[in-house]
Amino acid sequence: MSVDFYACDCCGESRYEEYVDTCHECGHRVCTSCVVDTDNIDSRYAYYYGVKFDGTQEQRVEYGMEDENRFNLEIGEIIDDTGIAPKYCPFCSGEEVNNDDLLVFLLNKYDLEKDDVEKEYLAAKEKK
Ligand SMILES: [Zn+2]
Ligand SMILES: [Zn+2]
């Protein structure tokens, strides 16, 4: 069995796949060294930072679990394949700002096209 390593979008380190997962909300990869507000979860495995089932219909709909017979989860159990829950995500919680997100924000704020900014950047680089 091969071991895969994934880069964390927060610290930039590449870590063993079991220690890195994608945030369900923002889609960034986060390692378990960067998670925040961990409720004292004492594990480096990303699985334990997944979304916990709260028994609500909203959550069943959000995670495709309307069929109650198929998804016999106890409240508090982790829903499979939910990656990192947004509450543990340093980006979603506002602890960290992702440069890619910041770029998108700036482009929208100043109504800029990324292509134009790239051209300007390259032109400025040439002049040096
Ligand atoms: Zn990290
Ligand atoms: Zn997130």
Image: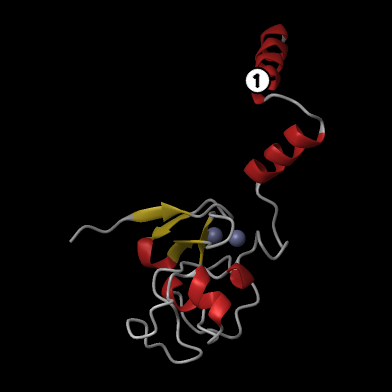
Left or right of 48 in this view: 110: right
Left or right of 34 in this view: 3: left
- Residue 120 picture location, percent across and down: 71, 15
Left or right of 57 in this view: 99: right
* Quadrant of the rendered image holding ligand 2: bottom right
Residue 19, located in which quarter of the rendered image? Answer: bottom left
Question: Which sits in the foreground, 1 or 48?
Answer: 48
Q: Residue furthest top?
A: 127
Q: From this viewpoint, is residue 50 visible? A: no
Q: Residue furthest left?
A: 1
Q: From this viewpoint, is residue 99 visible? A: yes
Query: Is residue 93 shown above or below 76?
Result: above
Question: Which sits in the foreground, 96 or 61?
Answer: 61
Q: Residue furthest bottom?
A: 74
- Residue 31 picture location, percent across and down: 50, 63
Residue sitting at x 42%, y 59%:
15
Label 1, ligand 2: CB separation under 8 Å: no
Marker count (numbered): 1
Per the image, label 1 sits on a secondary structure element best described as: helix
